[in-house]
Amino acid sequence: MRRLGLIARGAVAIFIVLLLVSSGVRADTTDTAVYGAGDYGGCSYGSCTLTLTSDGATSVDVVPTPAGKCTVQKDAVSVLTNSTTGYTLTAKTSTGNNDMTGASASITASSATPASPTILAMNTWGYRVDNLAGFGAGPTSAQNSGSVPSVAFAAMPASDESPTAIASSSGAANPAEITDVWYGVCADSSLPSDTYTTTVVYTAVTN
């Protein structure tokens, strides 16, 4: 997690800490001549690889006002695989609580779903992926301590819930495919000035 050295008085420092988990395919083969040789789905034995990367910890700092302000920032998630069956990329938080937590208060996760996302309410956070599920095309834009964004957001699932699918392919992703995951936070001055964090786990698997 990147630590914030100095913030403006009354500012809310918010970090989304990102973890990456990927799973490639180590293929079995029906080639009876040599064990550990042959082709599987367009990849030679043991070489259907998958690489998952992202921009890293995302800062979504807000300087609240009585009426409230909102910040939107993105993380670019990249998946590279030569698997001809493609991949699926999912996300969820690392714990059973998907709120952003501080020392004495929390920023509540949005109550909306990807199928029915909503405009962010004050003192809540959420995510969106343009053109996915019910999010709409957008386009989403980054902003710092601005007005409530007109695009809709949804809750990131907690660790004990089914992860949300944020990207997939039906074929090889080579060159890598990049998915922009947008994170939004709205806060008003009733929220204590503090550093709030949550951890999002991305998982990519070959189909």
Image (cartoon, helix red, strand yellow):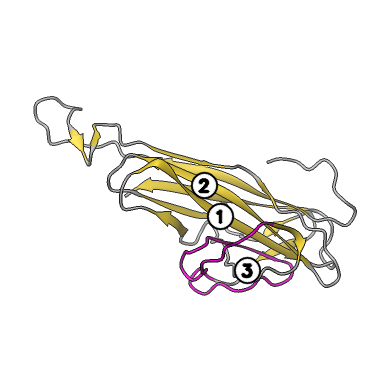
Q: Quadrant of residue 97?
A: bottom right
Three-letter code for the amino acid on which mark 2 is drawn: Val
Residue drawn at (54%, 53%) of the image: 180
Q: Quick one: SS at disc 1?
A: strand
Percent x, y of residue 206: 34, 46
Q: Are marks 2 and 1 in contact (CB under 8 Å)?
A: yes
Q: Quadrant of the N terminus?
A: top right
Which residue is under mark 2?
77
Mark 2 to mark 1 CA distance (whole Å): 7 Å
Which residue is under mark 3?
110
Residue drawn at (30%, 32%) of the image: 47
Residue drawn at (51%, 59%) of the image: 160
Q: Is residue 167 left or right of residue 109?
A: left
Q: Quick one: SS at disc 2?
A: strand
Q: Residues within 10 Å of mark 2 (few under 14, many from 20)?
A: many
> Is 3 placed above or below 69 here?
above
Residue bounds of the magenta highlight: 113-142
Which residue is under mark 1?
181
Three-letter code for the amino acid on which mark 3 is drawn: Ser
Three-letter code for the amino acid on which mark 1 is drawn: Val
